[in-house]
Image (cartoon, helix red, strand yellow):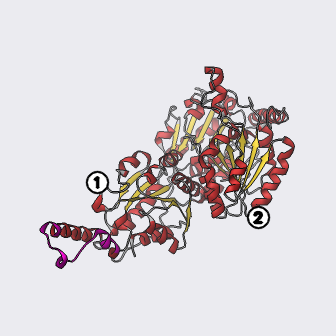
Amino acid sequence: MNGGDRIGEVLARQGVRFLFTLCGGHISPILVGAKARGIRVVDVRNEANAVFAADAMARLSGTVGVAAVTAGPGLSNTITAVKNAQLAQSPVIILGGATATVLRGRGSLQDIDQLALMRPHVKWATSVGMVRDLVPVLEKAIRTAKEGVPGPVFVECPVDLLYPESLVKEFYGAKSTSDIKSPVELAIQGYLRLHLKKVFAFSETPTFSASVRPKAPEPDSTSLKAARALIAKAERPVLLVGSQALVEPDHVDTLRGAIDSLQIPTFLSGMARGLLGTNHPLWFRHKRTEALREADLVLLAGVPADFRLNYGRAITGKAKVVALNRSSDDANLNRRPTVFLEGDAALGLASLGRGHAHPSWVETLRHRERARDEAIALEGKGGDNGGVNPVAVAQAIDRALADDSVLVADGGDFVGTASYVVRPRSPLSWLDPGVFGTLGVGAGFALGAKLHRPASEVWILYGDGSFGYTLNEYDSYVRHGLPVIGVVGNDASWQQIARDQVPLLGDAVGTELAKSDYHLVVEGFGAKGILVRERSELDGAMAEAKAYAAKGVPVLINVHIATSEFRKGSLSM
């Protein structure tokens, strides 16, 4: 087995079904070795999207997501996506090609210090120096990515470790001693032979481990007892569930059961959206700030007190705080909790046992929820000023969603508007970038989601700004037979920035776009494009898109939307 075969065998034994990549000579044996073992190799048009796809696969499947990229610029193109995975705590493996070990630092093609580049953005970065180490290092990488606080891991795989020894010998230009005439050449050939011997030493029979499944960490009994006491005394408790609570997809039912048992009003964010369906009596999505100001107990399940909670100030100073988190740093960020349950948030909530009902508190929150829903419904009936009301567009998307749909959020203002309206139908059916707020995640996330759940509708909600990052991946959807449905809210503006920049600074510089014919661009790749200019066209366009997707054709709906003040004052710092 050459090095590429060994890597493919490890991935197959660890349950990896897809390898995301953009080809390069440094990594070709990895791609071929993976394909030979039944792993589907999915190539994209930008290396960042390979990592975004691996990130989505990791979030939805419970296994690591894996991307293989070539050396130098191939790897540096991934940095934003890798950093996004780190901050989103996604277990992603990045396999990076590299120059031959004997040529490192000698000016070879695409040779840079890749470990220095990657170390700040991953849990662990390492380079393999011998063929025999490929298997144990990759198995350790998978374990490291999954255990504790999950995150990305980088493994550098020099090209001479991946090809068969006979070919590598040819690459090195090794000759027999009888062909050597000069003492200098004799010394060089001697060095090359010794180096090759070291690279391939003891590599004849690789040993593979069983599937790596690190045990999820659980909180200690003392902390659980203290948290139960606070819950028993609380009259106005609030539970916030975030993405980290769903890092183990197998724990979804446990998490839902725990919420039912605790009987605490619950707000969901990030990957937790859709966890409780659309009509759960304990689920709330509006007026969270008011609820936190009045709460006497706040449970943060996989939620740090970062800018999204106004650095902890969104929670009243009088409230007790229980933090359930795998990371002590996240749990103590900006607001020290009254009780810290260190471990998996889903298992921690399940260990708290039963709570008691809070009917008057729930009704107070429900009254606000109904009022806000009514206000949003009224907003959707508002006029179309230079385009379709974006709230009405979001309402049309929500009406069109199938029960098994997966939603990918990739944008600023339009997607922010849609998040108030569009309701994920089930657990693990919402993908957004997370705390990094990265634009351009949509195509990669959708690739990963559609491959993991091929029978489900996968919708991407794009702003016209974010769509520009990855519109070329419609080529990838078509080539790989992945009929996703994209909806672009096209207002010819980076509106989330312009809304505050113009009144504060009096200038729209850098925020203006064009109402481009994105629907025609995707047709050049072989997809179906649909243009919507009028509200009356919305439902028909959604139905047409669903019909094309059902026939295996990727679709983009280009909706000319109006400028809206719906999210005025939403600028984050």
Q: Mark 2 points at which residue?
A: 551
- The kind of residue on which mark 1 rests is Gly
Quadrant where the C terminus lies? top right
Say what secondary structure mark 2 lies in. loop
Instruction: Specify the farthest residue to the front.
Output: 181
208 lies left or right of 562: left
Between the C-alphas of marks 1 and 2, the distance is 52 Å
Up-down: is 298 above or below 38? above
Front in this rendered view, residue 157 or 277: 157
Q: Residue furthest right?
A: 536
**Does residue 425 sit above or below 34 in this rendering?**
above
Place of residue 556 in the rendered image (x, y in percent of width and height, measured from the top left): 72, 51
- Quarter of the picture holding the N terminus: bottom left
Residue reaching furthest to the left = 183
Residue 204 x %, y % = 33, 77
Name the magenta segment's main secondary structure: helix
- Where is mark 1, residue-wise? 105
Q: Residue at x 51, y 60 (%)?
A: 21
Residue 226 in picture, x, y percent from top left: 54, 40
Q: In this view, does 405 lie to the left or right of 106?
A: right
User: Going 51% across and 74% down the picture, which residue do you hit?
Assistant: 37
Is residue 357 visible in the rendered image? The answer is no
Q: Is residue 170 magenta?
A: yes
Q: What stretch is highlighted in magenta?
A: 167-185
Q: What residue type is labelled 2?
A: Lys
Q: What residue do we see at 37% from left, 66% from top?
A: 134
| Number of disc labels | 2
Can residue 154 be seen from the camera position used here?
yes
User: What numbered label is drawn on residue 466?
Assistant: none
Q: What element carries label 1?
A: loop
